[in-house]
């Protein structure tokens, strides 16, 4: 049976495959529509397999939040190029992927692929869609947070869709929890911009803090050498970089040093209680730079840098008549940790000519 233009059009509309591929599929399968569809699917999967060694470090973050703000899911779907990431077909794939992960409560990529979607495995839908787009695409990560009456979750995806954050806040009551829903989104927006790596300074590994302390102190000393050469003001060299290093003994010694300096300056002892707290707070600020950079709760809040994130959340809860604290967050950024291949075109041409 001859393959007609109408047959090709029908198969293309059903599969989104290129015209010539549709014509070839119908020719190979004696114009059997179902067999031609399967032929295209298998060919697409085979093409995808050939792309397996390519690096997919572009893409988008998908976010799904329940209507009651008690559940939220993030997914990272990677593509090879940013061009494909802007494609409507890719955007639809990300949307369906995060919705499927959310609705099935899939916690891993492997579990997600095995879930049922429109009567088949989700992997079948995903792989067929990837074959149509024609580039290596993969789900890299899934993250989810759940709450209850007193724990709400909210999230935020940056406008470029490359950064997504979900946040969980625990409150003293359901009433306070409802009031904290927009605050959770604001904290998620903060985290998207400020790139915290952990919730609190208490989560830092001791060996990591020790190594960071040595490295930062040496870096400041080196910079001060250059500043001295240029006759610029020197940067204060801290003794510590995290609150976890500031034991009661360390703080007591710092306070004693402050009082000794005030005495040497001839400041009346009766006014020390007005000066010491401020200088001690400055000592703590100067010696907790790691916390400010990497611990969410200890960072200066972008909407009010006079408060830390923890303090801002507590203030918002107080205004609502209750108490609250951030208990968890997840931040995903497209491609983080992936070593991108850098093509050296000149070297490639030279190698082929050798």
Image (cartoon, rainbow, N blue to C red):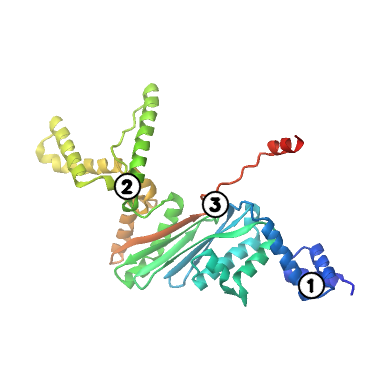
Question: Residue at 64% of width from left, 52% of height from top?
Answer: 54
State the residue in front, 62 or 187.
62
Residue holding disc 2: 206
Separation of residues labelled 2 and 1 (CA atoms): 64 Å
Q: Position of residue 83 (x, y in %)?
A: 65, 53
Q: Which mark is residue 335?
A: 3
Residue holding disc 1: 10
Mark 3 residue element:
loop
Image depth: mark 2 or mark 1 in front: 2
Which quarter of the figure is the C terminus placed in? top right
Q: Position of residue 202 (x, y in %)?
A: 31, 52
Image depth: mark 3 or mark 1 in front: 3
Separation of residues labelled 3 and 1 (CA atoms): 38 Å
State the residue in front, 86 or 270.
86
Mark 2 residue element:
helix
Which quarter of the figure is the N terminus placed in? bottom right
| Residue with the most extreme right position | 2
Q: Position of residue 279 (x, y in %)?
A: 22, 40
Q: Position of residue 204 (x, y in %)?
A: 34, 50
State the residue in front, 179 or 332.
332
């Amino acid at each position: 049976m001859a393959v007609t233009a109408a047959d090709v059009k029908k198969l293309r509309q059903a599969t989104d495959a290129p015209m010539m591929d549709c014509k070839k599929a119908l020719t190979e399968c004696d114009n059997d529509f179902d067999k031609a569809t399967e032929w295209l699917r298998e060919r697409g999967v085979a093409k995808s397999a050939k792309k397996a060694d390519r690096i997919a470090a572009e893409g988008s973050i998908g976010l799904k939040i329940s209507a009651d703000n008690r559940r939220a899911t993030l997914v990272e779907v990677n593509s090879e190029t940013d061009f494909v990431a802007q494609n409507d077909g890719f955007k639809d794939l990300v949307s369906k992927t995060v919705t499927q992960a959310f609705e099935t409560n899939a916690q891993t990529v492997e579990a997600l692929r095995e879930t049922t979607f429109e009567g088949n495995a989700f992997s079948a839908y995903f792989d067929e869609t990837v074959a149509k787009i024609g580039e290596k695409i993969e789900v890299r990560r899934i993250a989810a947070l759940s709450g209850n009456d007193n724990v709400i979750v909210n999230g935020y995806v940056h406008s470029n869709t490359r950064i997504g954050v979900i946040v969980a806040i625990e409150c003293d009551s359901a009433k306070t929890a409802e009031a904290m829903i927009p605050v959770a989104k604001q904290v998620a927006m903060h985290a998207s911009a400020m790139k915290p790596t952990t919730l609190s300074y208490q989560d830092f590994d001791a060996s990591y803090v020790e190594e960071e302390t040595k490295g930062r102190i040496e870096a400041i000393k080196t910079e001060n050498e250059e500043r001295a050469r240029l006759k610029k003001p020197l940067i204060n060299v801290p003794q510590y970089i995290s609150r976890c290093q500031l034991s009661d003994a360390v703080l007591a010694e710092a306070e004693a040093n402050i009082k000794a300096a005030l005495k040497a300056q001839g400041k009346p002892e009766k006014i020390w209680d007005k000066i010491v707290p401020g200088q001690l707070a400055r000592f703590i600020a100067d010696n907790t730079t790691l916390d400010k950079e990497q611990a969410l709760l200890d960072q200066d809040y972008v909407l009010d840098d006079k408060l830390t994130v923890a303090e801002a959340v507590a203030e918002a809860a107080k205004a609502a008549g209750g108490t609250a604290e951030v208990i968890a967050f997840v931040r995903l950024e497209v491609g983080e940790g992936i070593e991108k291949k850098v093509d050296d075109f000149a070297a490639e041409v030279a190698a082929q000519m050798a």
